[in-house]
């Protein structure tokens, strides 16, 4: 092989090497910055790209996918002077490879330090109870502050999450006692409310019972009054009939009326519980005569006898 052939072969090999040096294949999810003589010129997107060999070089290979950073545990003093241990995570994504490469040095460390500083600032302005109960508010406030601060770096903070908030053991014990006391308080309140409700229901039941009893007494009194009224009407009617009979000269009507009162009086005396001995200074024939008068009057009422016949015996009023 001659010298010319060797020269041609060397030139071909150099041309291939130069072409390969100028061809760059960028993988998906990555972007490469290009520097010409140390100055940023352009950004290579995913796929096949060409640069000028020996003039251009690759500056930084930037990951454009969303990434996560663990925020280490740090001590935070709250507004009410309680010391707690806090850690968290930060999710971010690079939107501009050139700014992420040339606007800030050590991008991940800068994001971590900025997040830790703002965690102390935000959580230090809150009470312990707020820290434990308002994590969503803390996350949203941190996200707004950190995302605004990192915008010039060409990145987007997508999420900031507080993983754990750990108060000291003594404070945890005090919080446990407080929670227990609060639960006992709620239990006592519920129990007292139950007793109160039971008493109200009992009083309402007694009230309804008293109302019904009063209604019953009123109805009973009304019935009794009606019965007395009817008895009085019947007695008045009987008296009127006796008076009419007397006016017509029927003596048996008088015998009936007086005998009825006489028998009622004897029944009352005999039924009294405080009477042991009953003195009856009356003749038995008088009672028999009165009863006979009643029988005779009954016969006349049914049409069995005359209106003016004498009684079988003498009444007690005829012995005077």
Image (tube, helix red, strand yellow):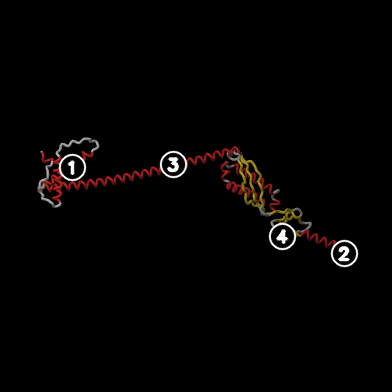
For marks 2 and 1 on the same chain, the one whose residue lies earlier in the sequence: 2
Disc 4 or disc 3, which is closer to the eye? 3
Dot 2 lies on which element?
helix
Q: Position of residue 82 (x, y in %)?
A: 59, 39
For marks 2 and 3 on the same chain, the one whose residue lies earlier in the sequence: 2
For marks 2 and 4 on the same chain, the one whose residue lies earlier in the sequence: 2
Residue at the image point whose x is 69% and y is 56% from the top: 29
Residue at mark 2 to residue at mark 3: CA–CA distance: 113 Å
Q: Which mark is residue 263?
A: 1
Dot 1 lies on which element?
helix
Q: Position of residue 160 (x, y in %)?
A: 62, 49
Reading the image, the residue beneath label 2 is 5
Residue at mark 4 to residue at mark 3: CA–CA distance: 78 Å
Q: Position of residue 107 (x, y in %)?
A: 69, 49
Q: Which mark is residue 195?
A: 3
For marks 4 and 3 on the same chain, the one whose residue lies earlier in the sequence: 4
Residue at mark 3 to residue at mark 1: CA–CA distance: 62 Å
Q: Which mark is residue 145?
A: none
Residue at the image point whose x is 23% and y is 38% from the top: 272
Residue 204's quadrant in the figure? top left
Residue nearer the viewer, 245 or 183: 245
For marks 3 and 1 on the same chain, the one whose residue lies earlier in the sequence: 3
Tags 3 and 1 touching, CB below 8 Å = no
Tags 2 and 4 touching, CB below 8 Å = no
Reading the image, the residue beneath label 4 is 47
Residue nearer the viewer, 167 or 191: 191
Dot 3 lies on which element?
helix
Residue at the image point whose x is 28% and y is 46% from the top: 220
Residue at mark 1 to residue at mark 4: CA–CA distance: 135 Å
Q: Is residue 146 above or below residue 21?
A: above
Q: Residues within 10 Å of mark 3 (few under 14, many from 20)?
A: few
Residue at mark 2 to residue at mark 1: CA–CA distance: 170 Å
């Amino acid at each position: 092989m001659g010298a010319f052939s060797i020269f041609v072969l060397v030139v071909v090999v150099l041309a291939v090497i130069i072409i390969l040096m100028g061809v760059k294949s960028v993988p998906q999810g990555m972007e490469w910055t290009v520097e010409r003589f140390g100055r940023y010129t352009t950004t290579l997107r995913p796929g096949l790209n060409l640069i000028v060999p020996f003039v251009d070089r690759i500056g930084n290979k930037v990951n454009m996918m969303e990434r996560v950073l663990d925020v280490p545990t740090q001590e935070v003093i709250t507004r009410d002077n309680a010391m707690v241990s806090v850690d968290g995570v930060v999710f971010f994504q690079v939107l501009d490879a050139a700014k992420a490469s040339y606007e800030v040095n050590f991008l991940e460390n800068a994001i971590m330090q900025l997040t830790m500083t703002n965690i102390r600032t935000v959580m230090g302005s809150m009470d312990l109870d707020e820290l434990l109960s308002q994590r969503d508010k803390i996350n949203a406030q941190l996200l707004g502050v950190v995302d605004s601060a990192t915008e010039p770096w060409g990145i987007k903070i997508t999420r900031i999450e507080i993983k754990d908030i750990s108060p000291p053991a003594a404070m945890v014990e005090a919080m446990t006692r407080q929670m227990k006391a609060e639960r006992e308080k709620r239990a006592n309140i519920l129990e007292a409310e139950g007793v109160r409700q039971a008493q109200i229901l009992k009083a309402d039941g007694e009230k309804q019972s008293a109302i019904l009893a009063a209604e019953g007494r009123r109805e009973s009194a009304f019935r009794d009054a009606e019965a007395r009224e009817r008895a009085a009407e019947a007695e008045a009617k009987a008296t009127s009939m006796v008076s009419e009979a007397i006016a017509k000269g029927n003596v048996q009507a008088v015998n009936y009326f007086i005998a009825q009162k006489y028998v009622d009086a004897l029944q009352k005396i005999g039924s009294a519980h405080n009477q042991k001995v009953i003195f009856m200074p009356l003749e038995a024939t008088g009672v028999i005569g009165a009863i006979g008068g009643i029988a005779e009057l009954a016969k006349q009422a049914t049409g069995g006898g005359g209106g003016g016949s004498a009684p079988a015996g003498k009444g007690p009023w005829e012995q005077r």
